[in-house]
Every structure is written in structure tokens, then in C-alpha cells.
Image (spheres, grey):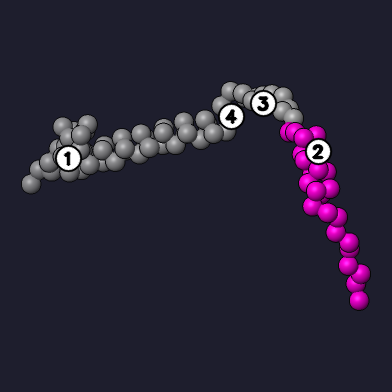
Amino acid sequence: MARSRSRKPAAAAGARSSSSKASKKPRAAAVEVVEENDGGGVDAAIAIFTTLMLVAGFLVLDYELGTHYGAGALFADSYEAPEA
């Protein structure tokens, strides 16, 4: 069977805990955050490439609509109806 520990009087425990709380004040550490700037990198290249591909896709689609169907925003005037 396990031996039980004897408890100290509440006054002695309270005195000890108050002195230990006073000595354990948190200390503020000075931390400096330094962020390295690499000039954009892969993230910027992906964003630029995606934008260029979206614009190119819009232009190709509009060109095809304009030349084949006479529709579209930019190339609607380039449609020539087949002669029958």
C-alpha cells in the first residue's frame, strides 16, 4: 500500500506560495522580427504567368468567335459570310 504524505498547515503553505509567486514574475524578452524580402520570387512569377495566359485565352476565344460567327467584343468586324 502506498504511504500517504503528511500535509503542512495552511498558513505555512500560504506563506511559501506567496513568496514564490512574487519571485516568479514573467520577464519580457526583447524579440526582433526580421523579414527577408527576396523580390517576389516564384509566387509573383506564377501570378504574372496566370494573368498572361488568361488574357491570351480571352483574345483567342474572341478572335475565333469574331472570324467564324461574327460575334465577340474585339473581332466581330472580321467575319466574312460565305458566298452562296
- Mark 3 and mark 2 lie on one chain; the one further toward the N terminus is 2
Measure the C-alpha gap from mark 1 to mark 2. 85 Å
Mark 1 highlights which residue?
Answer: 71
- Between circles 4 and 3, the one closer to the viewer is 3
Which residue is label 3 attached to? 33
Badge 4 amino acid: Gly
The segment highlighted magenta reads 1-26
Q: CA distance from mark 4 to mark 3?
A: 21 Å
Residue type at the position of mark 2: Ser
Q: Residue at x 26, y 38 (%)?
A: 62
Q: CA distance from mark 3 to mark 2?
A: 35 Å
**Is residue 9 highlighted in magenta?**
yes
Q: Amino acid at mark 1?
A: Ala
Q: Is residue 68 left or right of residue 81?
A: right
Question: Which dot, 3 or 2, sits closer to the camera?
Answer: 2
Residue of label 2: 19
Which element type, helix, strand or loop, lies under badge 1?
loop
**Residue 53 sits in quarter:** top left
